[in-house]
Image (spheres, grey):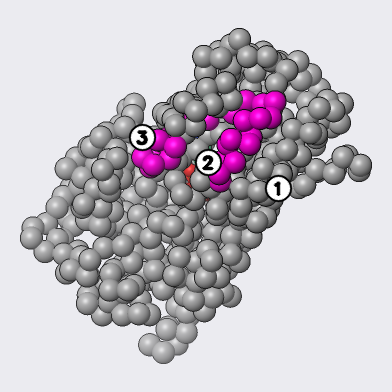
Amino acid sequence: MHIAIAASEGVPFSKTGGLADVVGALPRALAALGHQVSVYLPRYRQTKLTDAATVARSITIPFDDQYRFPSVVTAGGQGGVRFYFVEYPPYFDRDALYGTPAGDYPDNAERFALFSRAVLEASKILGVPQIFHCHDWQSALIPVLLRTIYAEDPAFRDVGTVFTIHNMGYQGLFPPDTLPLLMLPWDLFTMSKMEFFGQVNFLKGALAYADYVTTVSRKYSQEIQTAEYGFGLEGVLHDRAATVTGILNGVDYEEWSPQTDKFIAAKYSPQDLSGKAKCKQDLLAAFGIAKADPKLPVIGIVSRFAAQKGFDLIALIMDRLAREEMIVVALGAGDKPYEELFLRLHKQFPNKIAVKVAYDNALAHKIEAGADMFLMPSRYEPCGLNQIYSLRYGTVPIVRATGGLDDTIEPWDARSGKGTGFKFTEYSGESLLLTIKAALEAFRDQTSWQVLMRNGMGKDFSWNASAREYGKVFDKVRQMRGAATASEKVLV
Ligand code: ADP
Ligand code: GLC
């Protein structure tokens, strides 16, 4: 089957979060199953391409003022996957992908509408797939376009669409006059389509028009059908629950494994954990605290700083946590209030919490390898990748039992020697503190701690199984569309 994946970021070309990891790895796993896979991404200033070749010099995209003419370049094939980049420098040759610390770029609707239309037009030149697999609001217009203004296009007659939600918290909300600006019909501005509290909602459009909706863990697929996690779209999801499913993200173990990781001070494995001590020393040095007692447990954090990640809970308990024998090392960047929060905590407790406000892939790997525990107290977490990486590095996750965190971490039970981490449910400082204390207590018994580490290291979250699940969804969609087309033929 030919699958075209359209997304706004993908490793190794562009990344702000886990979406990029997924878009970097899932296509290869699908190709390994025998599918033909094309990936469409915007060409940002940050996108480094060697041997880029133009495959479509000028694609016409109508806007109400004047047409715009992006081109499409390819970086060739990698592991059976062909990567294409929509190039339009006025929109994508910028400092960042989506916005600056001051806020989102004001023309994000135009930027990603142009991208989505360019993907459809380019595919008519480069090969129309059986399935368009779109991710998050930035490519959510693809299913909308296909079933509205492109509905008559014979090139797309049998094409199916699958839309994957990586995060309900980002929906692509724009003022109503975005529709005429993008030359989309006004009848999309109704409650059953894209209208949302007086605004145009791109993600809601995909929920209305995609043949199938997936999200990145089983638990999150259920949570988003409730008011607590649905960000106002729970009703829409609930109404189409029969075509909503959760498929857990996999991990690219070529990138994230202590046996091969090129960023860490020493390699190690479940059979020989000795390298981890060197990684810990190297991590402490990277944070400028090389003199810290290496026997102290180190709790690592690597994160986008956003309300989703639950760090307000740390602020609530830091004075009491600081009394414990431990060190927190945190790497993160994002929303200003959280950057300031972590810097303030470091000032207040300089011996207990070391902080780097940055986006630093090498340091992220060093934390995975050098820390003893990894903290993700998320308010909500569609899947979460870092806790799964942590398992492979023997870095024991402490997580809130939500979304993918709940699906991937099993609570440690010292008596049976089963489990992979520590979980709490209630979103409160008290629950977090109790759980961290339980982890610190367990760390004192190094013999059983190593059992816990090895339990995690032995888990397999590679992409193969999840790619098969996507394959099943694609098959279902093809059947649905095949059936629809067949009945149309009868009518004609
Ligand atoms: P999300 O997509 O919500 O940010 P995930 O856990 O799915 O959360 O994925 C986050 C990805 O981004 C991981 O690969 C993680 O290592 C990386 N990452 C997040 N913040 C940073 C940072 N400050 N520096 C380097 N890598 C980061
Ligand atoms: C989102 C989610 C995260 C998920 C990632 C990849 O950014 O916040 O939980 O792992 O997408 O699917």
Mark carried by residue 75: 3
Please tell me which of labels 3 and 2 falls first in the chain: 3
Q: Which residue is mark 1?
A: 423
The span picked out in magenta is: 313-341
Q: Quadrant of residue 469?
A: bottom right
Q: Amino acid at mark 2?
A: Ala
Gap between marks 1 and 2 measured at Cα: 19 Å
Left or right relative to 113: residue 295: right
Counting other residues with Cα less than 10 Å from the Cα at mark 3, is it few (<14), some (14-19), or many (20 or more)?
some
Mark yes or no: residue 230 visible: yes
Q: Position of residue 486 (x, y in %)?
A: 48, 80
Left or right relative to 55: residue 406: right
Q: Which residue is mark 2?
A: 315
Counting other residues with Cα less than 10 Å from the Cα at mark 1, is it few (<14), some (14-19), or many (20 or more)?
many
For image coordinates 49% across by 76% down, the residue present is: 235
Residue 406 vs residue 84, the one in the foreground: 406
Q: Amino acid at mark 3?
A: Ala
